[in-house]
Amino acid sequence: IRTYYPHFIASKVDLTSEFIRSILVVRNPLNAVPSLHNFVYESENKLPEHFIRAPSDAWLEWRDKNFATEISSWAIHIRSWMYRSENKSDRLVISFERLADENLGPLEVTRLAEFLCREDGVSTRQPEDMPCIWWKVVNFKNLAMLLQNQQWNWGTRRLRQRKLQEAGFLPPPASGEKIIAQIQEDADAKREAAKDADSPHQTDPNAPQITEDQMMAMKKKQQEQQQQQQPFLREQEELLSENSFSIRGGAKYLPSYTEDQLKMAIDTISNLLFEFENEQTLSAALSNYILDAKKRLDLIQKENEHVKSNIAAAVEGGAPPPNENSSPST
């Protein structure tokens, strides 16, 4: 039986005392909490589960109201199941991240099979079959894409679009005439844009002329600004790649947190790590979660320092300071 007990989305009745053996799947809370929000968002908007990722603005509002409660619930869930089994052989801890990993996933499935085989009357496939089983069961998204190629992608997009239209999040499908008119309008707009790009710009004859040296200095300044931003973009892409496991539709983004929220997460995970330092699988997973939280915190602090230095430079130069609301830690 799958359960999130003692979280509120699970059954209010405690059935866990009836189970002697258990499998605890742990996931990085910085990804588990946004995943819970996606589930809540889908439920509130009457959408199928694992269908679409909640918009980032909806995430930010929900995060600030619920993060402290949810990170605490995440820790309570782990403690509840870790202390439930007095005999360690009756409990198996599985790392969600390892299970979803193409290289480590088959090893986790093998551990799972070995655990199940300890029960009388339960038999599983041979160890050499585990990579194939993992590929077919866990990696179903990639398998579906491989077997059906673009047809699967196109069909999924059309289904997702229709469901969103039915729920009122997208306008209803346009008629054939409207579609043709829109295509024509887009084509005309592209042609006009191409003309503007090719034609020399009309300038005011009374306006001061920009010299070639000034133009080169402006280009150099733009390149320096891009180089300053590039490390942040690269780090954001790396974090998104490391934490992207969802098959939901919608724009992909790395769920953001404030500095205080990340520090709260680090403290919560560190306390669990101290508590269960002798539990090899759990302690390894918790150590990785702390490392990920520190990476995110370091990125926010770098970006905030970058914003502050830009404001200081602008004030020294007599220009209006940039908008601080662009800070990612908000």
Image (tube, helix red, strand yellow):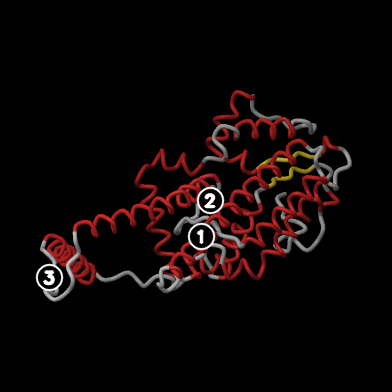
* Residue farthest to the right, as pictured: 86
Q: Is residue 314 positioned above or below 282 on the image? A: below
Residue beneath the point at 56% across and 32% down = 103
Which x, y percent locates residue 267?
74, 54
Circles 2 and 1, Cβ within 8 Å, touching? The answer is: yes
From the image, which quarter does the C terminus lie in? bottom right
C-alpha gap between disc 3 and disc 1? 45 Å
* The image quarter in which residue 32 lies: bottom right
Amino acid type indicated by mark 3: Gln
Which residue in the protein does label 2 denote?
A: 246
Tell whether 177 sits left or right of 133: left
Q: Nearer the viewer, mark 3 or mark 1?
A: 3
Q: CA distance from mark 2 to mark 1?
A: 9 Å
Q: Amino acid at mark 2?
A: Ser
Q: Earlier in the sequence, mark 3 or mark 2?
A: 3
Give the residue pinned by disc 3.
202
Q: Secondary structure at mark 2?
A: loop
Sequence-wise, which precedes: disc 3 or disc 1?
A: 1
